[in-house]
Image: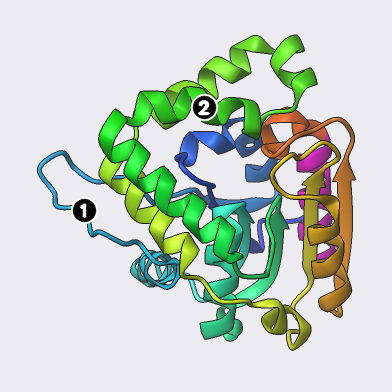
Amino acid sequence: MPVKQHHLLLIHGFPLDHTLWQPNMEALEHVAQVMAPDLLAFESAEAVPEVLTMEHLADQLKAQLDANGIQRTVLCGLSMGGYVALAFLERWPERVSGIILCNTRSIADTEEAKEGREATALDVLAKGSEVIARAMVPKLLSEKTRSTVPELAKTVEAMIARQRPEAIAAASRGMALRPDRTHVLRESDTPTLIITGENDALMPLATSEAMATAAPRSTLVVLPEAGHLSNMEAPDGFNSAVVDLLRTLSGA
């Protein structure tokens, strides 16, 4: 077992929080120092910006790394977390020893997708997080997961429901503003692991294959029968892929 030479920064998806990573923490903490911050956590009295850009979130993460004296990290971002990871890699490549992009894409939103982001923002502000949570769970988890592990669906729904509506709206609008960052992968020599679920309804396999093609030092892992939250739906396969990368980086 390699010494914990690496730091691993887990970046959750939209509109979730750090508890997304509960199925992974124990396995990953054996091989790395792990940090799993909340991106959308605001105190009830704290004003939330109207837009939370991926660059702003990357700034927040860099500040946390700086505060903890961490010079280099392996970024692991799922969905929106992948957008943030790519924004971070573009600005501070010297701080990234590896990048793991899970159920995400490097391209920008289409105009139709941007309209959908705004509709989500307006919807959550008008109806509340609970309504958004119920609508999103069928998109986030595969049909098999929902039928065979119903308690996971309840966990994810509760995770979304407890986020502040203003934070969900701000992140949705921020995602719509992100640029195409495929060139960041193409120009990077950072070891890159791309993980997706076979049945991800939100991110077709082609989006992961395109990132794998763009990144010179990439590995693509497709987890059978998993949906958009592959780390929760297929934790053993997910953890194994991440541990393999960390051990490779350690020269083990």
Q: Is residue 70 above or below residue 139?
A: below
Residue closer to the observer: 175 or 101: 175
Return the residue at label 1.
48
User: In the visual, does 183 lie left or right of 94?
Assistant: right
- Say what secondary structure mark 1 lies in: loop
Is tag 1's residue or tag 2's residue first in the polypeptide sequence? 1
Residue at left offset 55%, top offset 51%: 34
Q: Which residues are magenta?
A: 237-252
Percent of width and height locating residue 75: 61, 63
**Type of amino acid under label 1:** Val
Residue closer to the observer: 5 or 205: 205
Prevalent SS, magenta region:
helix
Q: Which mark is residue 135?
A: 2
- Asked whether the residues under the numbered discs 1 and 2 touch, taking CB atoms below 8 Å apart as contact, a structural biologist would say no
Q: Is residue 247 magenta?
A: yes
The quarter of the picture where residue 65 lies is bottom left
Q: Residue furthest bottom?
A: 187
- Say what secondary structure mark 2 lies in: helix
**In this orientation, does residue 98 appear?**
yes
Residue at left offset 63%, top offset 26%: 138
Residue at left offset 51%, top offset 71%: 178
Percent of width and height locating residue 79: 61, 52
